[in-house]
Image (spheres, rainbow, N blue to C red):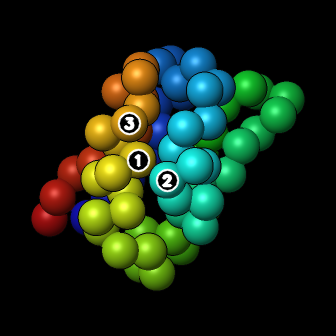
Amino acid sequence: MKVWVDPEKCRGHALCLTYAEDAFEFIDLEDRSVVIEGAVDSVAPDVFRAAANECPERAIIIEED
């Protein structure tokens, strides 16, 4: 599975952090979230899916293998 946050779509709502604080981090200077390096290997896929479903901008992109 590959997961990333589209920087063009992310508007800094940070709801992903509410659902998956171990998977995402917020970059204050850019006002957006990113996937924490290595999180895809250590966080359950359902956690990413829940965060993606709650993102109002649909900025979290998930590619299933």
Q: Amino acid at mark 3?
A: Glu
Q: Which is more N-terminal, label 1 or label 2?
A: 2
Q: Which residue appears at 41% of the width and 47% of the height?
A: 51
Q: Residue 49 placed where, x, y %?
A: 29, 53
Image quarter for residue 54? Answer: top left
Residue 50 appears in the picture as rendered: yes
Q: Residue 21 placed where, x, y %?
A: 61, 60
Q: Which residue appears at 59% of the width and 19% of the height?
A: 11
Q: Residues within 10 Å of mark 2 (few under 14, many from 20)?
A: some
Image quarter for residue 30? Answer: top right
**Which quadrant of the figure contains the C terminus?**
bottom left
Q: Which is more N-terminal, label 2 or label 3?
A: 2
Identify the element where label 1 is drawn. helix
Q: Residues within 10 Å of mark 3 (few under 14, many from 20)?
A: some
* CA distance for labels 1 and 3: 5 Å
Q: Residues within 10 Å of mark 1 (few under 14, many from 20)?
A: many
The residue beneath circle 3 is 54
Please, which residue is most extreme toward the right here?
29
Considering only vertical position in the picture, is 20 above or below 33? below
Q: Amino acid at mark 2?
A: Tyr
* CA distance for labels 2 and 1: 5 Å
Q: Which residue appears at 64% of the width and 26% of the height?
A: 12
Identify the element where label 3 is drawn. helix
Residue 28 - label: none
Q: Which residue appears at 53% of the width and 73% of the height?
A: 38
For the residues bearing labels 3 and 2, Cβ distance under 8 angstroms: yes
For the residues bearing labels 2 and 1, Cβ distance under 8 angstroms: yes
The residue beneath circle 2 is 19
The residue beneath circle 1 is 51
Front-most of 21 and 29?
Answer: 21
For the residues bearing labels 1 and 3, Cβ distance under 8 angstroms: yes
Identify the element where label 2 is drawn. helix
